[in-house]
Image: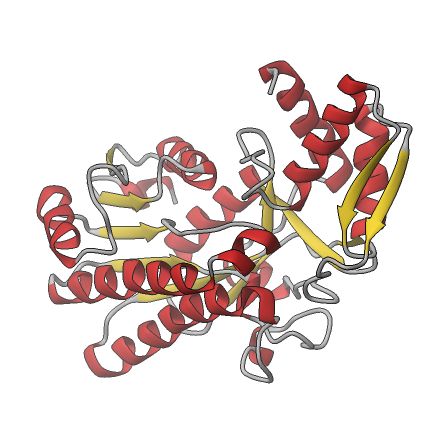
Amino acid sequence: METFWTNKRVLVTGGHGFLGKYVVSELKRRGCSELFVPSSTEYNLVKMGDVEQLMNDSSPDIIVHLAAKVGGIGANAANPASFLYDNLMMGVQLFDVARQRNIEKFVTVGTVCCYPKFAPVPFKEEDLWNGYPEETNAPYGLAKKMLMVQGQAYKQQYGFNSIFLLQVNLYGPNDNFDLNSSHVIPALIRKCATAVKNNDGEIVLWGDGSPTREFLYVEDAARGIVLASEEYNKQEPVNLGSGFEISIKDLAEMIAKHTGFIGKIVWDATKPNGQPRRMLDVSKAKSEFGFSANMKLEDGIKKTIEWFNDEGL
C-alpha cells in the first residue's frame, strides 16, 4: 500500500506531539512526501478562524486528527470543562470545514475513555453505548465520542469518508513525564527513578493498585493508525490496542524492578482508582486491516526506561 500515499497531501494535527511524531515518521516510511504538520502556536484549532486558515495553508487530501488536550486522572479531574470544550471544538470544527472542502478522508483518533465505566471486558466496539463513561474522564471521553457520532452523521447525510479509532493508553520513548499531567506509565517511571536517585525508601501511588489497564507501544499505535488510514473506510469504530491486561499493582512492580527501585510501594486509597478494568477486543483491527501489536509490554517498558535514563530527565 505504499503507493496509497503517492501525491497525496496529508495534514497531521498534533503531529509535533508524542504520538504525532511517530505517525509522521510512519507516514514518511510508507511513502508520504507531502506532509503538513502545524504547531499549536501557529494555529489554535479551538478557534474557527485558525481552522479555516490551516485548511487554506495545507489544502489536504487526507487529515489525520491527533491534536487533543490530554492527561492522567489528576489532570482530567482538575480540568473537566476545558478537556471537554477544547477537544470537542478542535474536532468538530475541523471536521466540518474538511467536509465543506470535500477532502478524501478524515481519520479521527479517539480514546478508550469513550467506553462505559462497566463495559464487559474485553471492550467490544458494539458496547460503546451501554452505559456512561468513568466519571473522572467522562468529559474528555464524551467529547471524543461525539466526533464518532459526527462522522457517522456526515457519512449518512453527505457521504463524507471518515473513520474513528478507539485507542488505549500509549507509552514509549518521548512520552510526557511531567507528574502533573502524565499518564500512569511515565508517572511511575519518574517516581521510581527519582526515588532511586534520592535513596527514598518508599513511593506513594494513587488508588489501591487493583484497576487493570491495557497499554499500546507508541510505534505500534502509529503503524495501526497509518494502516487504518490506508485500508479502512467503514463508519463503525475500531479498537486499537495490544489485547493485554495488567493490574496497576503488577505494572508498578514491573517498573520498580526495571528502574532498580527496591523500596516500599504505598497505595493512597483516598485517591481515585479510575475505571475498574480496561482491555479492548482487538480482533476487528486484525480482520479489517491486518493490525496487531508487536511490542510486548515488559520489553516496551524497558525501552522506555532506557530512553528516560539516557535523556537524564
Asked whether 270 or 151 is in front, the reply is 270
Q: Is residue 103 left or right of residue 187?
A: left
Whether 128 is drawn above or below 240: the answer is below
Q: Eyeballing the image, is 178 above or below 168? A: above
Which of 42/79 is in front?
Answer: 79
* Residue depicted at x 31% and y 44%: 12
Q: Quadrant of residue 170?
A: top right
Query: In the image, 106: left or right of 140?
Result: left
* Position in image of residue 140 (x %, y %): 47, 63
Residue 164's image quarter? bottom left
x 79%, y 35%: residue: 255
Residue visible at 66% across and 39% down? Answer: 187
**Image position, residue 235 (x, y; %):** 39, 73
Kindly give the residue lying farthest to the front in the view shown.
Answer: 270
Is 246 situated above or below 7? below
For image coordinates 18% across by 61% down, the residue present is 98
Q: How is the image coloured?
A: secondary structure
Residue 209 located left or right of residue 72: right
Q: Image quadrant for the C terminus? A: top right
Left or right, 82 with respect to 104, comes to right
Q: Position of residue 41 (x, y in %)?
A: 24, 37
